[in-house]
């Protein structure tokens, strides 16, 4: 068989997998089932001594499975049209999307509350309405811009390698002046990565990113995320943590008003510095960086497997 259903321990997440797309160098967490009968199947690499079709990789039922059943499944799957495969893929993707829609906010908010005492829901309830106005503006821009999947995967590469993610604007670059969600990063690197299925984590993060960028039902969640990110950046600025905050082109924030009580504080919380358009763009870029780290540094599959 050329295709099979890849499954994970909790069976909440699945993906349709082509035999030729399997990475032969990393088979440690490859578990697949026959799409027809549901029995587990083995992946056979091309030119393997065990291969029935030596020239191409494929999936095969174990020898313990009844031969008639195995032949029946082989025949059925071999006759799948491209439309059939496409519909199967759509059905599997929709099932994953339903799970994300139902669980994402709860999983993320609970984890960040437990680990860093960051009470997202409580903060949102007490924030000045100005923050939400900016959050909605940013959420709108976020949905109109590029796909950030590559940035998500870069962050995953960093944290799984034990390297903190320092972000300058939305990209990982040489000017690493900001460490978003530092306590979350520390906990994730030290206590979480060794317990996660990396492939599954990448798959879920990709689904979450697509959910918050494209789904109509996630519009409110997208606004919440950027409202919180705006709050975090503003607090950093107020405390003087992000002195010299720059845009991608090196443009620094324009701050006309400083706190009279403490010269080390860069701004007041009245958000008057938003009147400058360049400031908005710079803070927006950093806000995207915060949202991407929140999405990435939530151990979704660990939470799923505990249920």
Image (cartoon, rainbow, N blue to C red):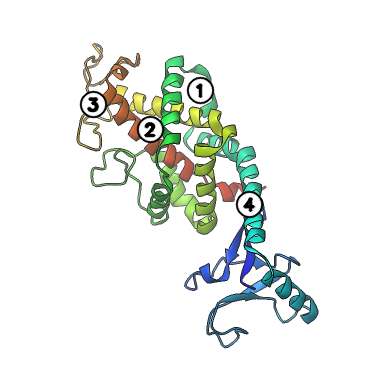
Element on which disc 1 rests: helix
Residue under circle 2?
287
Instruction: Compare residues 299 and 114 and report the one nearer the observer.
Output: 299
Residue 231: % across, % down? 40, 25
Residue under circle 1?
124
Element on which disc 2 rests: helix
Whichever of labels 2 and 1 marks the residue nearer the N terminus, that label is: 1
Identify the residue shown where x is 66% and y is 64%. 81
Q: CA distance from mark 4 to mark 2?
A: 32 Å
Which label lies toward us, 4 or 3?
4
The reply to whether discs 2 and 3 touch (Cβ–Cβ < 8 Å) is: no
Whichever of labels 4 and 3 marks the residue nearer the N terminus, that label is: 4
Query: Which circle marks residue 90 in the picture?
Result: 4
Q: Residue furthest top?
A: 260
Whichever of labels 4 and 2 marks the residue nearer the N terminus, that label is: 4
Query: Which circle marks residue 253 in the picture?
Result: 3
């Amino acid at each position: 068989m050329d295709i099979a259903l890849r499954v994970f321990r909790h069976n909440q997440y699945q993906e349709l997998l082509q035999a030729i797309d399997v990475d032969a160098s990393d088979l440690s967490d490859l578990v697949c089932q026959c799409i027809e009968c549901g029995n587990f199947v083995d992946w056979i690499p091309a030119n393997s001594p065990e291969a029935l079709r030596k020239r191409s990789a494929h999936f095969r039922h174990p020898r313990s499975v009844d031969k008639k059943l195995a032949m029946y499944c082989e025949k059925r799957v071999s006759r799948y049209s491209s439309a059939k495969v496409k519909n199967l893929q759509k059905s599997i993707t929709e099932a994953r999307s339903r799970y994300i829609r139902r669980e994402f906010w709860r999983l993320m908010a609970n984890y960040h509350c437990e680990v860093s005492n960051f009470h997202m829901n409580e903060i949102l309830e007490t924030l000045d309405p100005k923050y939400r106005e900016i959050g909605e503006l940013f959420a709108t821009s976020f949905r109109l811009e590029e796909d950030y999947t590559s940035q998500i995967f870069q962050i995953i590469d960093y944290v799984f390698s034990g390297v903190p993610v320092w972000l300058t604007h939305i990209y990982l670059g040489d000017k690493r002046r900001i460490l978003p969600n530092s306590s979350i990063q520390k906990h994730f690197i030290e206590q979480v990565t060794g317990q996660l299925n990396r492939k599954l984590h990448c798959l879920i993060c990709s689904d979450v990113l697509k959910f918050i960028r494209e789904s109509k039902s996630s519009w409110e969640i997208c606004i919440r995320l950027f409202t919180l990110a705006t709050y975090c950046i503003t607090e950093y600025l107020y405390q003087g943590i992000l002195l010299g905050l720059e845009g991608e082109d090196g443009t620094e924030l324009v701050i006309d008003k400083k706190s009279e009580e403490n010269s080390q504080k860069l701004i007041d919380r009245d958000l008057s510095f938003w009147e400058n358009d360049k400031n908005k763009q710079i803070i927006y870029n950093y806000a995207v960086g915060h949202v991407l780290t929140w999405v990435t540094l939530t151990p979704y599959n660990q939470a799923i497997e505990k249920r």
